[in-house]
Image (tube, helix red, strand yellow):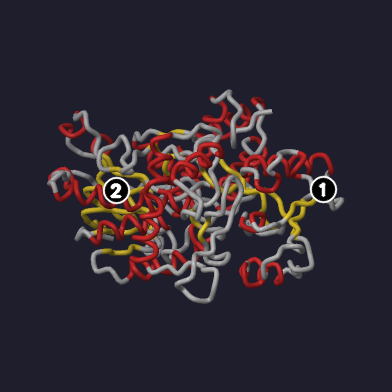
Amino acid sequence: MADIRHFAQALVIGSGIAGSTAALAMADQGLDVILLTSGSNLDDGNTVYAQGGIVYPGADDSPTLFARDISKAGCFHSYNKAVRHLAAKGAGAVERILMRRAGVRFATRGMDEDEEYDLTREGGHSIHRVLHCADFTGRAIMQCLVRAVGNHPNIRVLANRTAVDLLTSQHHARSLTYRYQRLNQCLGAYVFNDAGQRMETVLAHATVLATGGLGRIYLHSTNARCARGSGLTMAHRAGARLMNIEYVQFHPTALYHKSRRRFLITEAMRGEGALLLNGEGERFALRYDPRGELAPRDVVSRAIVDELHRSGDPCVFLDCRNMSCDLPRRFPTIHKKCLDLGLDITRDTIPVVPAAHYQCGGVVSDVHGRTNIDGLYAVGECSCTGIHGANRLASTSLLEGVVWGEAAGVHISKQLKRGRKAARKLLDDIPDWADPMHGDAPDPALLAQDWNVIQSTMWNYVGITRTRQRLKRAADELRSLYGNLTEFYKSTPVSKPLVDIFHSSYAAYIVALSALRNPVSKGCHHLE
């Protein structure tokens, strides 16, 4: 079969809120954009599962107050320049991209669309400033972005494509001339076409990583199937800087039910009065923090874990029965999901446990989304802008995706219009993927066992509460697994299951190693 090569001015890997925003920003400036999604649809990622909302200024709000809440939730480990940037630029980006460009209709206090926006409050926020669409904010946003992307003539969507490796001049160019150059340039990516079962080469002057998080390397997670840390793996292998990898946030309230993806119970419920109860029916959160249920997520998650260790119970309960809002109308998604399981949240408490939720660190990027590799940008959850520090403030993730997605798109457009492009002869110097001519397909039983090792090791040893001994054990076991998978990867024909587990083992190893190397207990990296 002939090798397939695609070329565009810009490549975006990932189609969530950050990736779609970046693609639209560049396409609106006239650039030819390829947008990759690993699923069959653009909304197969994490954004669609975001229930709570996105930060937008409240009546008594200010950028200074918002920045203070971000820094406090992040345990004062955030990058102040980035925090101030988000606080100052966030509202304008929401209005430009989501409200006007995409046409998202957020909830208002009355039935009239001209009414004031209905702003709710979540943990760590000092005032009501969370804009929402009932409890399906992410889904509403993605529906509008998918429509805008699909209607744009300058965007080519390549579905069922899994990025395997980033292409760089120092790693992949045939000519030694480019390998000796001081500047390392990103030139696109090798991509696996799952539908066609073949490798493809996608070449571009600029590449935007928007691959999302890594929650699925844990046994229990609220994340989509694609959240396997692929962005971290590809960026690190290419030579990009990573930071704050050890800070993995666990959401305190995931529905306690046997399922591969834990169903999220939005923090907005606690913001509007829901209480946490232990198995004895006692409200316990105030024993751990004076803010109770509205303490930052790392605090509430540890409080739940401590309570479960004390009692031996498998879960705690979220009590919504005394909330003043109309529960079926305000939280229709949660109400329906619970009804399907035989729970009426107007009369029954909801069994909940913490689950891996958000990657606070990632590929280091500046306020334009630029990384230390020329032509490579990182936006959204896979990036480390410095905003989240040691723990993310609720409802800032969607905002960060919009602000940095737009910023990266605008910056790339300006750079390419100024003529800062990779030379065409350099792009032509990149070879196609060389697949091994021998080897058997991966044994599903072996892959299943490797997945079990990754997820169980991360959950048991690199979870909500950590010790030096656990982290050492995790790093040793994951190093061995990664080494074995690397040898297997080199000698086996490429496939999506193989790429997924290779990326995940690499990501799990660097998370465990980062945690082991950090002796300071802070935020999501809590050492006993």
Task: Please name whichever residue, 227 or 270, is drawn nearer the observer in this view of the structure.
Answer: 270
Which residue appears at 56% of the width and 60% of the height? 51
Secondary structure beneath dot 1 equals: loop
At x 38% / y 40%, what residue is drawn?
Answer: 235
Q: Let me know if residue 483 appears in the view.
A: no
Q: Position of residue 73 (x, y in %)?
A: 56, 39
Q: Secondary structure at mark 2?
A: strand
Residue at 32% from the left image edge and 38% from the top image edge: 371
Residue 262 image position (x, y, % from top left):
64, 56
Find residue 475 and report its horizontal and vertical position in percent.
57, 30
Residue 526 vs residue 466, the one in the foreground: 526
Q: Is residue 412 left or right of residue 307?
A: left
Taking the view exactly as shown, the residue that stands out farthest to the bottom is 111
Work out which quarter of the rendered image holds the N terminus and state it: bottom left
Query: Which circle marks residue 207 in the picture?
Result: 2
Q: Quadrant of residue 346?
A: bottom right
N-terminal of the pair, mark 2 or mark 1, is 2
Residue reaching furthest to the front: 60
Residue 498 sits above or below residue 1 on the image: above
Q: Quadrant of the C terminus?
A: top right
> Which is nearer the eye, 230 or 97?
97
- The part of the image, by quadrant, that contains residue 309 is top right
Viewed as shown, does residue 101 lie left or right of 120? Answer: left
Q: Name the residue beneath numbered marker 1.
A: 313
Going by the numbered disc 1, the residue's amino acid type is: Asp
Compared across the picture, whether 337 is left or right of 167 comes to right
- Amino acid bearing label 2: Thr
